[in-house]
Image: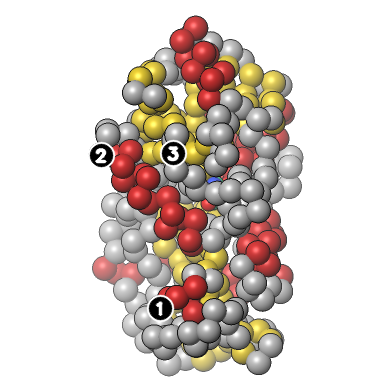
Amino acid sequence: METTANSLVTVEKSKTSKIDQVDFDNLSFGSTFSDHMLVCDYKNGAWENPKVVPYGPVSLDPSAKIFHYGQSIFEGMKAYKDTEDSTWLFRPLDNHKRLNISAKRLAIPEIPENYFMEGLKTLLKVDEKWIPKNEGSSMYIRPFIFASGNGFHASPANEYKFMICLAPSGAYFSGKVKVLIEEKYSRSANGGVGFAKAGGNYAGQFYPTQLAVEKGYNQVIWTDDNTHEYIEEAGAMNIFVRINDTLITGPTSDRILDGITRKSIIEIAKDENINVEVRKLTVSEVVTAAKDGSLKEMFGAGTAAVISPISGFGYKETDYDLPELKEGFASLLKKRITDIQYNKAEDKFGWRYKL
Ligand SMILES: *Cc1c(COP(=O)(O)O)cnc(C)c1O
């Protein structure tokens, strides 16, 4: 094993590479992993130096608190190749900030910015050959922190692992998404952890989503836990609704995650002179708009799919279809954001970050 080091991050290279076994023309999402990963341990009240090591299993004690008390948070981001073979990240410091917002809520120690950024950059440089170059493909990056410390006492762990894994991924075509507006279950509540990217938020979503799938829908539209009258998120994405020519999304809160795609779309839409309203959105106004034809588009927004158009929704045993628009806001906004991500267009917002 070759070992190199910079001042903060050490690198232990894998002896062999799996890259020749990968079909880069047929990558699915998040199921192929690169040769290396980043591992950084928190022990005795401090983060130790991050290490790039060969990708592989992690050994944990059965009493590790992640298994019992769910102290687990993550981020999702991407690296993009442009036609000149340069690598770009998109607003990576925002992912670092949000990881620490999640950490605080789950009583997990915060990770310093240079550990996150230097660790990420070193890992991406070691596995740079793994970043897909095909149109629409990218390197999906998964930073995460979990409680590795032991013991059945219900209290925060005293040891944690911060890790980053890289998953080269093909273009994400979600197809037509038919959604069910949720009337019973909730993904988040006031005072809860809905604004954090906590693993448990996803665990809680799976069962209601299974029920929706059994009824013939692909995803759940989450409504507020108290009244189920307000539209909040689309699965694990933020949601946008277009009524006539106004684009509406709910305000971030305890219950709605502050998505980086969401806030970028808001800025790009304003730049396109689209009328954007960030306000509470009721189920009844969306149903009324669907009935009178003023509901033009609905779409989810998040890093993995960027924008995922919704073809129709179900509510109270009735299905509503959306019109098929060739050139709606969704396609326009997706093109503008991905052109910035892939360095195909000017980035007047300063979001691109060169590796
Ligand atoms: C990650 C996530 C999003 C999207 O956030 P991005 O920063 O745009 O990827 C939206 N909603 C939930 C619940 C999420 O977990």
Q: Could you tell me which residue is drawn at 43 percent across and 92 percent down?
A: 1
- 145, 4: nearer the viewer: 145
Badge 1, how many Cα within 10 Å: few under 14, some, many 20+? some
Residue 285 x %, y %: 56, 18
- Label 2 sits on residue: 214
Residue 128 x %, y %: 49, 67
Is residue 26 visible in the rendered image? The answer is yes
Q: Could you tell me which residue is drawn at 35 percent across and 77 percent down?
A: 17
Up/down of 339 relative to 242, above or below: below
For the residues labelled 3 and 1, the Cα–Cα distance comes to 41 Å
Is residue 92 visible in the rendered image? The answer is no
- Per the image, label 3 sits on a secondary structure element best described as loop
Q: Earlier in the sequence, mark 3 or mark 2?
A: 3
Q: Could you tell me which residue is drawn at 62 percent across and 24 percent down?
A: 247
Left or right: residue 322 versus residue 333 is: left
Up/down of 302 relative to 42, above or below: above
Contact check, label 3 and label 1, Cβ < 8 Å: no
- Per the image, label 1 sits on a secondary structure element best described as loop
Three-letter residue code for mark 3: Lys
Q: Which of marks 3 and 1 is nearer the N terminus?
A: 1
- Label 3 sits on residue: 184
Left or right: residue 280 versus residue 64 is: right
- Per the image, label 2 sits on a secondary structure element best described as helix
> Which mark is on residue 106?
none
Three-letter residue code for mark 1: Tyr
Residue 277 x %, y %: 69, 26
- 191, 314: nearer the viewer: 191
- Label 1 sits on residue: 55
Up/down of 184 relative to 121, above or below: above
